């Protein structure tokens, strides 16, 4: 057995915190059954205690250990059968074995099964459910590679397992399965249309304007995923950009401009200040590169970052949600 997996499992069983990769973003994990261990997550991140965490499990057979699932068994079987392991989190009534600190006092718990072999190996070896938000200071851009974790958390965590770059790059979709009509609380790679098709019923899609100071799920605060550098959003095709070009400015497009030299000349920006998330506008690639690009530009000491908004369809809804909350820190 991999020595790193054994060491991480031992650390978790001893009440420690470790960094683990998932297919979405890197997570800061602790034994979800140990309230004091979970409290270390909040301390390391500087995360407010009223912001609940997601419980990570090995497979759907673990659901009955930690939640009251029988009432929702038909929906759960459809969702987990289609999407687990994978980037979707379900909200269910919690059992008393889960400490209130995990759910911020709520009677419901958000649970998901991550699709990454390292995280799965740690779950299997430790035989523990793991509470794990993103492995970064609270409110900052989520990490999608181990270098970003080390750059922001430094030596605050002893064990960090490197699983390469995250395949998806955005946090999981969160689905409230307990509502009369299932409701998306946070958008992600698994879309409302995909969920509705699997369930065979209508669902309530996420409203990107939803803001809560006492969130029922992660990702509902007005300001989140923020850079330190001023972030300004603009619509595709916008012609009113020059007002933001004060000092050293970077601009990021969804895809590589077809007339790159013409765009640089029109905007009167040096070529090295123009960036894009994807060569061809593929939104899955945009999602994968979103946080890493923003963090790279944030460390490049620009006065402002101008970022194009994506089409609001499919995974573009989740990308736009992250950008709106990241830009909310700054006056538009």
Image (tube, grey):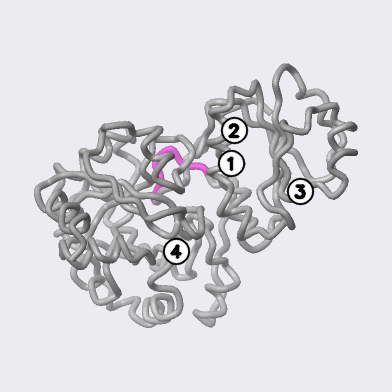
Question: What residue lies at 74% left-to-right and 18% top-to-bottom?
Answer: 246
Image depth: mark 4 or mark 3 in front: 3
Foreground pick, 32 / 259? 259
Question: What residue lies at 21% left-to-right and 65% top-to-bottom?
Answer: 66
| Residue 103 in the image: above or below residue 298 | below
Residue 203 sits in quarter:
bottom right
Q: Position of residue 294 (x, y in %)?
A: 57, 38
Q: Tag 1's secondary structure?
A: helix
Image depth: mark 4 or mark 2 in front: 2
Q: Disc 2 versus disc 3: distance between alpha carbons?
A: 16 Å
Precedes in sequence: disc 1 or disc 4: 4
Question: What residue lies at 63% left-to-right and 53% top-to-bottom?
Answer: 286
196 sits to left or right of 47? right
Q: Position of residue 131 (x, y in %)?
A: 26, 52
> Is residue 81 located in the magenta-colored stretch of the structure?
no
Q: Which residue carries the number 3 mark?
A: 256
Q: Which residue carries the number 4 mark?
A: 87
Q: Which residue carries the number 1 mark?
A: 293
Precedes in sequence: disc 4 or disc 2: 4
The boundaries of the magenta stretch are 211-216
Q: Which residue carries the number 2 mark?
A: 297
Main secondary structure type of the part rendered in magenta: loop
Asked if the residue at tag 2 contacts the one at tag 1, i.e. Cβ–Cβ closer than 8 Å, the answer is yes
């Amino acid at each position: 057995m991999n020595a790193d997996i054994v060491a991480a499992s031992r650390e978790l069983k001893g009440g420690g915190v470790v960094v683990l990769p998932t297919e979405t973003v890197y997570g800061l994990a602790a034994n979800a059954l140990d309230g004091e261990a979970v409290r270390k997550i909040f301390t390391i991140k500087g995360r407010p205690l009223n912001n609940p965490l997601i419980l990570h499990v090995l497979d759907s057979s673990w659901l009955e250990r930690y939640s009251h699932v029988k009432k929702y068994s038909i929906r759960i079987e459809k969702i987990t059968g289609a999407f687990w392991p994978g980037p979707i989190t379900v909200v269910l009534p919690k059992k008393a074995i889960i400490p209130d600190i995990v759910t911020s006092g709520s009677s419901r718990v958000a649970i998901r099964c991550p699709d990454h072999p390292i995280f799965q190996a740690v779950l299997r070896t430790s035989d523990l459910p793991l509470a794990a938000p993103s492995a970064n200071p609270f409110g900052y851009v989520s990490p999608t590679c181990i270098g970003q974790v080390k750059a922001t958390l430094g030596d605050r965590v002893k064990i960090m397992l490197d699983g390469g770059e995250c395949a998806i790059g955005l946090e999981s979709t969160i689905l409230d399965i307990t509502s009369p009509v299932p409701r998306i609380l946070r958008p992600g790679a698994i879309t409302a249309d995909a969920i509705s098709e699997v369930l065979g019923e209508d669902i309530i899609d996420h409203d990107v304007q939803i803001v809560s100071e006492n969130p029922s799920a992660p990702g509902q605060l007005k300001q989140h995923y923020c850079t330190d550098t001023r972030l300004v959003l603009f619509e595709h095709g916008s012609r009113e950009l020059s007002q933001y070009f004060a000092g050293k400015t970077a601009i990021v497009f969804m895809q590589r401009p077809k007339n790159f030299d013409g765009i640089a000349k029109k905007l009167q920006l040096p070529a090295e200040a123009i960036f894009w998330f994807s060569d061809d506008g593929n939104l899955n690639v945009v999602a994968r590169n979103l946080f890493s690009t923003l963090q790279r530009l944030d460390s490049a000491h620009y006065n402002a970052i101008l970022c194009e908004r994506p089409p609001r369809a499919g995974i573009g809804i989740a990308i736009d949600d992250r950008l709106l909350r990241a830009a909310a820190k700054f006056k538009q």
